[in-house]
Image (tube, rainbow, N blue to C red):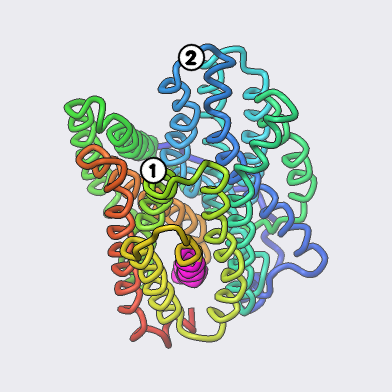
Amino acid sequence: MALHVEPEQRTVSRPCLNEDAKEDGLPVPRRHYATLAILATLVLVVLDGAVANVALPTIAASLHVSPASSVWVVTGYQLALVMALLPCAALGESLGLRRVFVGGVIVFTGASLLCSLSPSLPWLIAARFIQGLGGAAVMALGISLMRFTYPKRLLGAVIGWNATAIALSAAVGPTIGASILVLANWPWLFAINLPVGAIALAAASALPEPPGTGRSLDLTSVALNAITFASLVLSVDLATERPQLAAVLLVVSVSSLVALVRREMLRHAPLIPLDLLRNPSFRLSVVASICCFAGQMASYVALPFYLQHSLGQDALRTGLYMTPWPLMVAVAGPISGRLADRMSNGFLCAAGGVVLALGLALSALWPVHDNLLPLVLFFVLSGLGFGFFQTPNNRNMLLSAPRERSGAAGGLQGTARLLGQTIGGVIMTLLFSQTSADVAPRIGLAVGAVLALAGGLVSALRIAKAPQERRV
């Protein structure tokens, strides 16, 4: 079954732009307004996730539900996000990147209003699920629109600034959320999205408008994709409490994925971008991304327990000690982005993965007693390594894809990130279930170091392809 989307009507008498002209991007100041629209929305999505996590205890108490039930406020959002990333990317390529991106902003902002008005937990979970659908369109297509906003020679630097904005949002998100809760009730956490969403929509008229292909969207493939990722997320969520049901869901996820791949294998532009994965450079970037994000997430889960349970720090000090990591990602993003426009992306990613692995290994093995300064230095090292890995790797994924498949590249980039984060979370869940809260964090940091090193080594395989990468 397929949904046919009619291509937009366009004047055929206009001369076609050649490829070089297309790569010039938008003129200034329109370029700046387009950047504002993209970055404001991406920051909005990242901040929303961070402040929602902080507010879970408050929401549970206000709505008179258990803490375990309140976690669905986060799970529902993540579920929609991972289910919709690839379909939103395909829809963007069909209808036009700008149209679907703006639609995502409207859905996300409107759902934020529903969240702020939620009278019960089911209402809030449903609103968060809708938010996730809008967020998926933003995350899948935002970076793709950057490709049409800036000339290729500046794209690495722009992706670096994008990484900086997201890292800073992740760093200050918990603080902003806590500050709002001190001054107002939890619905204001979501109401604050409304003015930011309005600003993004006002600037969205400056976004580039690459034409859609009008390709049909196969609804059976969309359903299989949703079943695959929904079953995977739910199996992870239930792994410790209901392992048998989690195992069944994992089997359903794998079976659906196999069916989806078989259905899409011969398509010219498949929902799961198998055509892009046939490119060795793109494929290696995806694998490296999964490895490094898995290592990062395992470490992010392990560090609070390590600092609080093993080293006796309170929640405030734990947050302060961990802050240098995202701050260093923010610092490294623009630097690595500019370097990525001038040298081998494979070398930068390999070096970043190795530095990240070194920082995590030292965090796991260093004998810490009263002086926590060495840990702070190791967190700085880890943040720099991740920053130098992430930006060149994202740049290579985007530019390894043909321009008309930019949406698919952005969708798979987001999917690789979420898949890696899911793997990292599963690793820590298993470690906590098999060992104590004092032992599991240091093992988790060591596992994160191994995963980061694997990401660096995979990236090193691209160094031989450096001339091709620079020509992308």
Q: Residue 309 carries which label?
A: 1
In the image, residue 407 sits, relative to residue 45, either above or below, namely below
Residue at image position (73%, 34%) is: 192
Taking 390 as reference, is 470 above or below it?
A: below
Front residue of 445 and 375: 375
Instruction: Determine the CA span between mark 2 and mark 1.
Output: 27 Å
Write the start and end of the magenta stretch as one range.
377-401
Q: Quadrant of residue 426?
A: top left
Measuring from the top left, give residue 235's x and y in whole percent. 27, 33
Q: Which of marks 2 and 1 is in front?
A: 1
In the picture as drawn, the residue positioned furthest to the right comes out as 29
Q: From the viewer's side, name the closer residue of 241 and 348.
A: 241
**Is 202 contained in the magenta span?**
no
Residue 32 place in picture, x, y as percent: 77, 63
* Residue at image point 58% right, 23% down: 58
Q: Tell me the residue that label 2 is attached to.
A: 65
Image-based side of 185 in relation to 443, left or right? right
Decide whether residue 395 is among the magenta residues.
Answer: yes
Is residue 430 visible in the rendered image? The answer is: yes
